[in-house]
Image (spheres, rainbow, N blue to C red):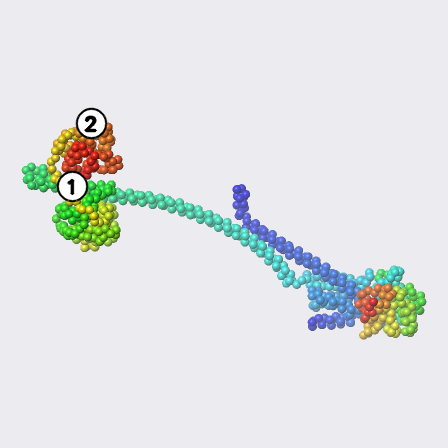
Amino acid sequence: MATGRALLGIIALLATALPCGPALAAAQPSDMAVKAAFLSKFGSYVNWPPPAASGPVYLCIVGNDPFGGVIEAAIRGQQAGGRPLQLRRFAGADGAGGCHIAFVQGANAAATASMLGSMRGKPILTVTDARAGGQQGMIHFVLQQGRVRFHIDDAAAAQSRLLISSRLLSLALNVRQRP
Amino acid sequence: MRPLTRLAQRWPNVPMAAGVIAMLLLAAGLAVIFDNESGYRQQKISEIQVQADILAASVSAALDFGDAVAGQEAVDALRVNPQLMAAGVYGADGQIFAGYERAAGRLPKRLAGAPADAGNTVDAMVPVTVGTERIGSVYLSAVREPLSRRITRYSVIGALIIMAALVVIVLGLAHTALRRANLELESRAKALSDAYAELQVQVDERARAEEQLRQAQKMQALGQLTGGIAHDFNNLLTVIQGSADILRRPGLAEEKRVRFAEAIVETASRAAALTSQLLAFARRQPLKPEVIDLNAKIRGMTNLLDRTLGERVRVVTELSETLCAIEADPAQLESALLNVAVNARDAMADGGTLTIRTGNAEPREDGRTAVYVAVADSGTGIDPDLLERVFEPFFTTKSVGRGTGLGLSQVYGFAAQSGGEVKMTSALGEGTVVTIILPCSDREATPVTLPAAANARRGGTGRLLVVDDNEDVGAFAEALLLELGYQVVRVNNGEAALERAATEKFDAVFTDVVMPEMTGIELAERLKALAPNMPVVLTTGYSDEISRSGAGGRPVVFKPYRLDTLAQVLEDVLAGNGEAGPSTAA
């Protein structure tokens, strides 16, 4: 047992000392850069219903854009389950109906809620950030112990006929289970 | 037969065959172990591969999102497998992302290419992919089943195979041993049969040697017997010849003439008794028992004993007067007493006393009363070792020419045949006592008949044919018959007798029995055809022929015969009493 614990310690040290993940290896990652990288990767773990199941995967920034140029850097060269990943920006929910993944951040909580509400039931994976308020999409970024983590609302994903990979679910802080 | 022979020829190869089979078994066992080992290795590799695949799938998201904690959790889930020595998740650049190791150094810090296949471990490396994109690698390293356990498992198989091989080898060796034992047994049997043959040869040789020994003993006994007879006869002949010489002297006084003539007669009687004894021994002639007064018989023998034993031996008789009569052959009794007395005399070379004692003995076992006659001498005695052998025929302590060795044998035979027994007690230097015990008879004793005077003259008339091949005996018989008054024609063989009988008339024929060419009995038969009513009197000194073919009812006069006896028989025959039984010599 003592050696087991020692090993664990060593591994934990290794894990924290080393810059983890290929996406974050390039530079000193800021929270937003991490979130941008996450956004670029979600597409690989989600199955959309037809007709959204084919063609490029559209990653949309709806409302405010907190990423700046970071998101473009993150998307570059990325694919989503073999499908090309393309970035779109929308000021409001209107016109965002063709999006596959939508990072939703309104000017305030009500605006965010309104946008989320207009997207409900559509096959769009909605993503929100706790820094922008309590409104939660299907995936909700939080900062915990200095690390970017997320909650997943699988029930909402089910309503939108989205299938989130269990591998992604296993990384979530908690999962609101589908009924 | 042929397959058996072939099998037998192959027998020597059995141990080799057993060895080959054992080697094959061992090889098969090794092959099984090797195959098992190799199969196990393949199975282990695929097992680890599958586990690596599972890990790769489960850590792909964690690796993708850089969630080291989740990655570590996924890796840690594999810890339950004790054979898994190290598990690592590496990024696309080969840097370690998460992992664990059971021993330091098991987990490479960086992953560069496929890991070398270490001897005792099974390694697997599979890529971690998201969609089609390779985002890293998973490395697993597992020990195979511990060597000790594998060895245990294989040792069971090995032990079984070794045992089987041993069984085969032992069977082969046992077969060899059996074959060797068989060979040994065969050689022993052969040795045994050789030994048996050798033994047979020895037995034959021994039988031959014994036969030779018997022959030698027979010759020795014969020498003893003939020597003894010659000695006894010489003694008697000395008396007869001496007496006859004196009788031939002219002008002999009448008193002396009678004395010497009687000495001749008496001595001749003893000689006749001796030959009779010999014949009785040779023929085992049955006794002719008569009822006898023992005391009277002994008294009648005292003169004979005195003369026989010589002047240096004093004969004393102590006779009980209350004796019962006994039943025995008188001649044999006389011979027995004489034999004992002569032995006593020989034991008393310097003279002594011979005591003859009679008395009533203990009753016999069958309840009959008995009497004894004991003859005691004051001689040298007999060695106790020899005492039990003295009754054996031909056993004698006397030198050749001093005795026949038949004396005590005759005594023993006489006593036994008379229903009694003979005992001998002796001590060296104190003399010997021979006791003859004879059962009483319930009949009255007949008075002792003294021989009639030899010179009793009888008259005879008639014409006799005398047949004898011996010139002397024939002439003697002729002289006797002429003396008796008969007319005598003498021939010396059967043919001549038949010729004379065919042409002349005879009142009787007196013929010897034992003759060459034609025996007296054959002659008598042929004469019967010629003259059925003519009586034939047979005479013989040797009764074997008569005992074999019988006298045919004709009277027989045994040699040596007395004038008296001859006269009586011829008188009876000529008187028509031709059916008289054989007469005995006096």
Query: What residue is at 18 percent from the left and 32 percent from the top?
Result: B576
Q: Chain of mark 1?
A: B
Residue nearest the observer in this picture, B399 or B483: B483
Seen from the viewer's position, the closer of residues B143 and B514 is B514
* Closest to the observer, B128 or B284: B284
Q: Is residue B92 left or right of residue B473?
A: right
Q: Quadrant of the C terminus of chain A?
A: bottom right
Q: For residue B426, what is the image quadrant?
A: bottom left
Residue position marked by numbered label 1 in the rendering: B269
Q: Is residue B160 above or below residue B86?
A: above
Residue B467 seen in this snapshot:
no
How packed is label 2: few (under 14 Cα within 10 Å), some, or many (20 or more)?
some
Q: Viewer-nearest of labels 2 and 1?
A: 2
Can the viewer see residue B306 in this picture? yes
At label 1, counting other C-alpha atoms closer than 10 Å, the crowd grade (few under 14, some 14-19, many 20 or more) is some
Tell me the kind of residue under disc 2: Ala
Q: Chain of mark 2?
A: B
